[in-house]
Image: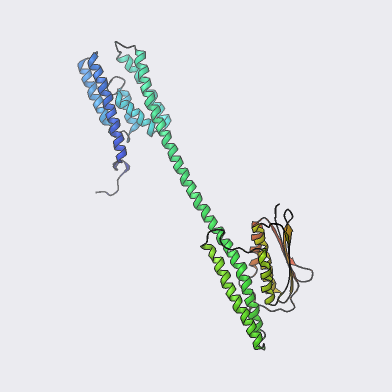
Amino acid sequence: MNGSATVAERPRPLRDRLVDTVLILFAAGFGLVLARMRLDTMTVPRWLFDLDQVIGALGCAALWWRRRRPVELAVTMVALSAFFELVAGPMLVALFTVAVHRPPRTSATVFLLSLVTAVVYVLARPEPDLPGSVVALLAFSLQGAVVGWGLFIRHRRQLVLSLRDRAARAETEALLRAEQAQLLAREALARDMHDVLGHRLSLLSVHAGALEFNPGATAEDIARAAKVIRESAHLALQDLREVVGVLRAPVGEMPQPTLAGLGRLAEESERAGMRVDLRVEVAGDLPESAGRTAYRVVQEALTNARKHAPGAEVRARVSGAAGEGLTAEVRNGPGPRAVTSAPGGPPPGAGRGLAGLEERVSLVGGALEYGPTEEGGWQVSAHLPWPR
């Protein structure tokens, strides 16, 4: 037995079989009513009445295949209705089927053909007790009603399908938006890891480099440097847990840095041997996004100064007000000594911090400028929007 079955060979759902049965019973009942009325009057020969019953019964049986060949079946029933009376029931069901399952243009064509055959029937088999116009009007009304009902059901089904398709597209778009949000979250996580870990690890690098290039340091100096290295490593692990926690915590629950943390940031840099002059002059309620971005600007600038100009004096200024904007500026002079964090050149990823910082500033609608100063140092300046 062939495992693959064509669409026509597949069993129809129970609902379709029930609908087909109801429509066949309707066509048969309609024919029985007409037959009963004809028996009361009997204005046609007996042989024609018997043939009419046979044609009507065959038409009802043919309705079982109405879904497979709706147009062919409807045209056949319409053609037979031009002379046979009891095929009217199957003909109405066939018109309804075409209206439901075929385009409106096809339904209109078959409907017009049925109107022509109705006129032919009135002329071929006139009723002695009823005017032909009344019989034709009744036929037009019945045929128009079933076709209109079929078109209504077709349009309703198309509406339901379009709504389902729209819902599926909306679900797909929601998934795409979720994926985009995840991508943006990963990018934000990467920036935070760079900013936070770069700051902490640069502290470790400075103290480790001092021990490496000062082999004659006293035990007290070594112990003090080891303590700073241990504390910085502990803080680096703590910051890493907070940054990675964004992957588990809902959006907005992860603690974010603010301008209030700049003092602690300056103290950590001073413990690493830097001279930091920090001034914060901000009046009013600062937006969280601007404060967080200004913190990252100062943090990245201090990290770069520690890497490339160790021992240099650093001046950090953060000022602004509502309506004027927020400015974060960090300047450092040339370093008095050239001590690298490790032999062999700059650490991996050097040079990417400013590019990431520029992207971070642009996301909040600000502008970032950086470059060498006339004194031979370096300057980083960011201007962030602060609406009233």
110 or 301, which lies in front?
301
Q: In the rendered view, how is the structure colored?
A: rainbow
Left or right: where 387 falls relative to 51? right
Q: Where is residue 70 drawn, in percent x and y? A: 34, 32
Give the total number of marks visible in the rendering: 0
- Let me know if residue 358 appears in the view: no
In the rendered image, the vertical position of residue 356 relative to residue 219, given as above or below: above
Toward the right, the furthest residue is: 374
Image-quadrant location for residue 98: top left
Residue, x 30% and y 13% (percent of image)? 127
> Is 121 displayed left or right of 201 in the figure?
left
Please tell me which residue lies in front, 87 or 178. Answer: 178
Q: Is residue 283 visible?
A: yes
The residue that appears at 38% across and 21% down in the rendered structure is 141
Percent from the top left, x then y, of residue 252? 57, 58
Q: Is residue 199 above or below residue 3?
A: below
Q: Position of residue 342 (x, y in %)?
A: 63, 79
Quadrant of the image occupied by residue 117: top left
Q: Position of residue 288 (x, y in %)?
A: 64, 58
Residue at the spot 58% in from the left edge and 75% down from the top edge: 234
* Residue ranking furthest to the front: 284
Residue 282 as seen in the image, left or right of residue 51: right
Q: Quadrant of residue 370?
A: bottom right
